[in-house]
Amino acid sequence: MQEYTLTVFSEDKTGILNRIVTVITRRHFDIKSITVSPSSMEGIYRFTIMLVLEEDQIRKLTEQIDKQIDVLKAFYYDNSQIIYQEIALYKVSTEAFYGSDTVENLIRNHNARILSIEKEYIVIEKTGHQEETEALLNELKVVGIYEFVRSGRVAIVKPMERLKNYLKSIEG
């Protein structure tokens, strides 16, 4: 089993997210992360779904999603074919900064940054792979953390976007 990133392109139609997730969960596959955003083409949305599966499973799943009404096209990629990141936010007590360089050093060592300083807490932002955001989380747990949230994967494929080539091929 390995990580795959499934990208699904569709028009903005009510219920499409539910149908895509249903196709995945009916097969008892676990979604590790999912993000949805506009794509580079106006009116077309991009679903980025991270799953851990066997290659034959992701291939069959992609074919099933591709058949859904309102799905323009679905593709899958392994991690070597994409560039990806996540963003994480950490809320830490302001007191953790007093009298110690520990938190400040953690922020520097993990290439994170301070987003907001409030009276009771400080919000830290870290962008990177899941392992990197979790590493900072684990170190911040030692000094005390109030809250943590991480986005789903966002990814860009290394080859040129296949959707544009696909749409050109069917325009004919």
Image (tube, rainbow, N blue to C red):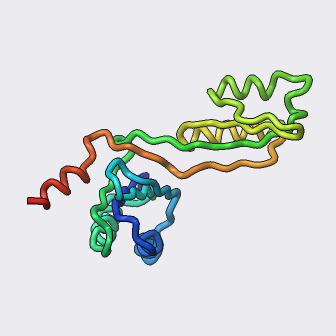
Q: Residue at x 80, y 25 (%)?
A: 102
What is the quadrant of the N terminus in the image?
bottom left
What is the quadrant of the C terminus in the image?
bottom left
Q: Position of residue 85 (x, y in %)?
A: 50, 41
Q: Examine the rendered structure and indicate whether residue 164 appears above or below residue 8.
A: above
Image quadrant where residue 45 sits: bottom left
- Closer to the camera in the image, 43 or 72: 43
Is residue 115 shown left or right of residue 93? left
Image quadrant where residue 91 sits: top right
Image quadrant where residue 140 sits: top right
Q: Residue furthest left?
A: 172
Q: How many marks?
A: 0
Q: Residue furthest bottom?
A: 26
Q: Residue at x 47, y 73 (%)?
A: 18
Is residue 162 shown left or right of residue 106? left
Q: Position of residue 115 (x, y in %)?
A: 70, 35
Is residue 127 shown left or right of residue 26? right
Q: Examine the rendered structure and indicate whether residue 89 appears above or below residue 38.
A: above
- Closer to the camera in the image, 153 or 61: 153
Q: Residue at x 43, y 52 (%)?
A: 3
Q: Position of residue 28 (x, y in %)?
A: 47, 73
Q: Position of residue 60 (x, y in %)?
A: 30, 68
Q: Examine the rendered structure and indicate whether residue 14 appears above or below residue 88.
A: below
Q: Residue at x 43, y 55 (%)?
A: 48
